[in-house]
Amino acid sequence: MNTEGRPLSPHLTIYRWPITMTLSILHRMTGVALSIGLIAFVIWLAAIAFDAVPYDSVKAFMDSLPGQVMLFGWCLSFFFHLSNGVRHLIWDTGRLFEKSQANASSWFVIIATVVFTAAYWFMV
Amino acid sequence: MVRDYCHGRFHRGLLVYGLGGVFEMSLNSPLSRVLGSGSAKEGTDHWWMQRVTAVGLLILGLWFLISIAALDSFAHDDMHAWVREPINALMLLLSGVTIAWHSVLGVQVVIEDYVRGPALKVVSIILNKFVHLFLGTAAVFAVLKVALGAPL
């Protein structure tokens, strides 16, 4: 059977990129970032508890620029994943499923993430 | 009109040719379909525990960030003394277990979506569970050692 030259149905690339898709992908990316953060969390606890893991080296790295960038990334990821996670929990109750609501809550999550992260990082 | 009988590994059913296409008519009783929970052999447990641990982490995560921000010093002996406080040790134990639990469920979905090939997929999922079990247990062990051990 000749399968070439057939008409294709409109695929993802033909649509204007909706904000909800960005948030969906970011939820997954921040989740993976926070899973990597779990490794850092365990190293930090191990450094406090065990002599074999030198606490001062761990602290020195976290105080350095790469360490601070990582901490800021996890901070940002945490507040995004938390805000969007609450959005998911609301969806689980069957609410806010209308297209306009999904778009509005997307922007609400983005604003909440920026505000929480900025408040935590710069004020605390 | 019944045409074929299909006997798959996980599913028994009839292929029914009717108006508008071919339909599969299950020969399983409704009860056996619920008990079998499909080819995954599990029900809503993954989805549900993802939500339960999420609510837990909402509390534990905010506790952690607020508590850490309230600290004056991150020197080793100060951190050690902080972890030794029973309420902090308790919250850290709950955090370690809940983070690892939530994380293992989330990463598993990512693996299921992106890792190609059944063999590599199963190996990745098992490895994911081992790594998270190790991380969760290491966190618990570290907190217990500090909390139950002597002051620094």
Image (cartoon, helix red, strand yellow):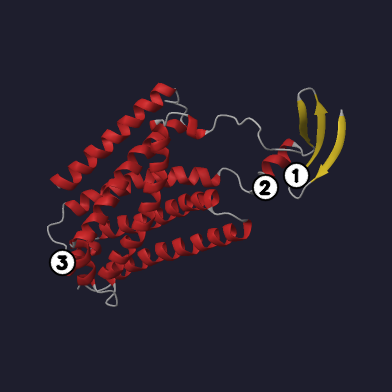
The chain letter under disc 1 is B
Residue drawn at x 35%, y 31% is A106
Residue drawn at x 41%, y 30% is A18
Considering only order in the chain, which callout, 1 or 3, is on the residue closer to the N terminus?
1
Numbered badge on residue B49: none
Residue type indicated by callout 1: His
Residue B78 as seen in the image, left or right of residue A73: left
Mark 1–mark 2 CB contact (< 8 Å): yes
At label 1, counting other C-alpha atoms closer than 10 Å, the crowd grade (few under 14, some 14-19, many 20 or more) is: some
Residue type indicated by callout 2: Ser
Residue beneath disc 2:
B39
Give the Cα distance between marks 3 and 1. 60 Å
Q: x%, y% of residue B143?
A: 31, 65
Residue beneath disc 3:
B75
- Residue B80 shows up from this direction: no
Circle 1: element type: loop
